[in-house]
Image: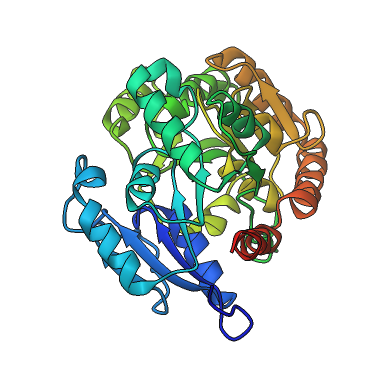
Amino acid sequence: MKDMKKRPIHVAILAARNSIHTVRWINALVNEGVEIDLITLHKQTSTDPIDNKIKLHLLPFSLPFGYLLNKNHIKKIISEIRPDVVHAIYAGGYGTLLRIANFHPSIISAIGSDVDDTKLQSKWRFNLVQSNLNFSDQITVNSNYLGAQVKKFKINSISKIIPFGVDTDTFKPSDKTLKQKINIGTVKTLEYGYGIDILIKAFALICKKYTSINLIIVGQGSLKSELVNLTRELKIDNMVMFIDQIQYSKVPTILNKLSIFACLSRKEGFGVSVIEASACGLPVVVSDVGGLPETLIDGKTGFIVKKDDPVSAAKAIEKLINDPKMRKKMGQAGRKFVIDNYNWNDSVHKMINLYTEIV
């Protein structure tokens, strides 16, 4: 065992380099003195840069079979860099790569779709994820909901909750003057599971009653054209603005243009975008799925509505439109809720403590 008192802990992270979740974790960890090697199959980079102190290893075989074909390469890299611990972010593909590497001590972070309803997708995938989870020495999840999902795999170890927090010094209300328009908005990938169509339909039910109201949708995805067409069919395209994916560092600027934040997902492991919005002092409206109810206090920092229900969402949004005092009060309470429960520095230090304990 290496002497941890003489040098920083060294972690090999197996994860997608094009994920903002990966970028945020590795940048924060390396800035806290952890030595990081990122091992990835993903050639595409995130819109946000990776710290130059991080050593990058791009595996030769790409998706979807690279998780299996890179067996010799991952073993070679790990034997050369000799980390103290290997940490896979995502229980499916990168969890498989971790198990094939056959390294201990090891950690798997289950972050959402990798463990959410996996049994319903296929038996072989369920068995694969179960094998990966059982191989790891420790499992982390970012919500109570995902912790319950992990238990369905009948694993040997107990998962530890380390929330994916928010930097409340970056995500905070702006000091600009009161907005002239009511902007409802969301920052999500434009895919079916995130319910952007439900938000558009909810907005269509109420927008004609008001002269100064807009819907702002930020993100990219395969359904963008379909969603744009939906706004045209509903004859609200002149009140809806689509903005392509932006750098993570610019998200607070977008959020501070909004008056109300909505996340009407059909499936969600946690809901980082919601706590980011709350940190910026916005009241939130979320669907009652997955880990989303954990991201707010219903009736105090926002409202929880039924999934796939534009009418329910429209009623909640309209309450906030008509009551500026409620918006302000809920926004203030939401920021306090995030500071108390989802501070990013606390999350990073919990992960570092886990590395130290497992080593």
In the picture provided, is 9 more to the left or to the right than 114? right
In the picture provided, is 299 more to the left or to the right than 270? right
Residue 155's place in the image compared with 333, above or below, is: above
In the picture provided, is 226 more to the left or to the right than 194? left
318 and 61: which is toward the camera: 61
Q: Quadrant of residue 7?
A: bottom right
Q: Quadrant of the N terminus?
A: bottom right
In the picture provided, is 197 more to the left or to the right than 163? left
Residue 165's place in the image compared with 118, above or below, is: below
Residue that appears at 21% across and 56% down: 72
Q: Is residue 125 visible?
A: yes
Q: Quadrant of the C terminus?
A: bottom right
- Give the farthest residue toward the bottom: 6
Residue 100's place in the image compared with 116, above or below, is: below
Whole-percent x, y for residue 291 in the image: 62, 32
Whole-percent x, y for residue 228 in the image: 32, 30
